[in-house]
Image (cartoon, rainbow, N blue to C red):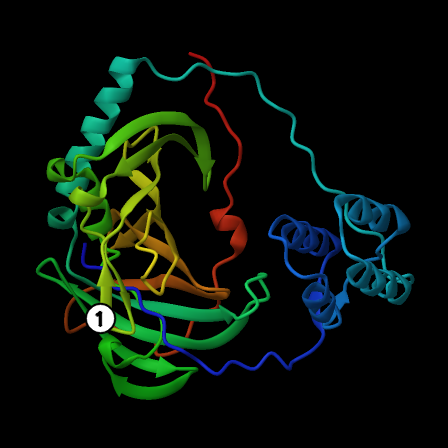
Amino acid sequence: MKARLAILAMVFCLAAAGQQITVQQLVRMVRSSIELSHKDGEVAKYLKRVKLTEKLDASTLEELAALGAGPKTLKELAKLARESASLPDPRPVEVRRKKPTVPPPSPAEQDRIINAVRDFALGYLKGLPDFICTQVTRRYADPSGMGFWRKIDTVTAKLTYFDQKEDYKVILVNNRPVNMTMDDVQGATSSGEFGTMMHEIFDPETDAAFQWERWGKLRGRICHVYNYFVRKEKSKWSISYEKKMRTIPAYRGLVYVDRDTEMVVRITLEALNIDPSFPVQEARTVLDYDFVNISGGEYMLPLKFEMRMRQGRFLVKNEVEFRLYRKFGAEAVISFDTPDSLPDEMFAEEPAEPKKP
């Protein structure tokens, strides 16, 4: 797979204080720190930088204490409770009613769907038109390993897809004009999202094992959700470190298939059993597709790609969006502004099952 992941050692300042979060986000963070056995003092240190947008009440403090939050953490939580006493009550968490269970497709139908998707995946690149689009990469890092993300930069590139080949030209970094290629960009980068990942998962030579897992719903579409696994000896997905070291791990993930069109609308990928001596210990990606109109034709094209990696406690995250698709040609006009981020709601999966026939 022509995908490159890299981590560059960075000097990253976390001095900026006052990160605003909701009570629900606070509870999630403290729960996670308890489960991961983070040191009490370190958790308390980061809580000093937190500002709540909602009231933290006594019952929530008791819940976190019962879960095992340390004394220093509880001291900072009590301080947050006092400081937030005049703020609005937390918004109630929506509880979705479980829908009646609908049985999965028959084994024969599951196999038929995978074969249909394989035909789609292997012919995908040939079916795409020549086009130009804007690729926006927002890069984040967190040395604490606790999900306190800080943005490093925003890289805006012109992506040209011509004759089934991708070409990238960086035009803006933090909205300042530049003239460079993606290879010139230091830090974590990726490429090959336009069908390479999907092609290699479904390539018969990869010998991926698929299993129907459940129904899902993305962007209003009912989906078949399959899990898959690729053995190390069959894998072509590589992870590189600072463009000097490279490893090819086994991997697994999920494939979301639109029930009505039998096209792929999401792929997830997680590296497995990475060599312990390799600097990157975790790597995972999520790639979302959606229909895009190009010169009157509807095509299923990448919408957003998210990549996460971990080196020790140091975390990196890239959020890559593909915007402003245009037909390739002299008349194609691409804005040199960086579009705003797509809303998170577009990528939230809803628990859903199709109606019984």
Q: Determine crowd level at label 1: few under 14, some 14-19, many 20+ residues with C-alpha closer than 10 A.
A: few
Q: Quadrant of the N terminus?
A: bottom left
Whether 102 is drawn above or below 303: the answer is above
At 28% from the left and 31% from the top, the residue drawn is 262
Q: Position of residue 342 (x, y in %)?
A: 47, 59
Whether 242 is drawn above or below 208: the answer is below
Q: Quadrant of the C terminus?
A: top left
Q: Position of residue 352 (x, y in %)?
A: 51, 28
Residue furthest to the front in view is 277
Q: Position of residue 172 (x, y in %)?
A: 35, 82
Image quadrant where residue 199 sits: top left
Residue type beneath disc 1 = Ala
Image quadrant where residue 225 sits: top left
At 19% from the left and 38% from the top, the residue drawn is 202
Q: What residue did someone put label 1 on?
A: 332
At 75% from the left and 54% from the top, the residue drawn is 23
Helix, strand or loop at label 1? It is loop
Q: Position of residue 9 (x, y in %)?
A: 40, 78
Work out whether residue 355 or residue 29 is closer to the camera in this orientation and state it. 29
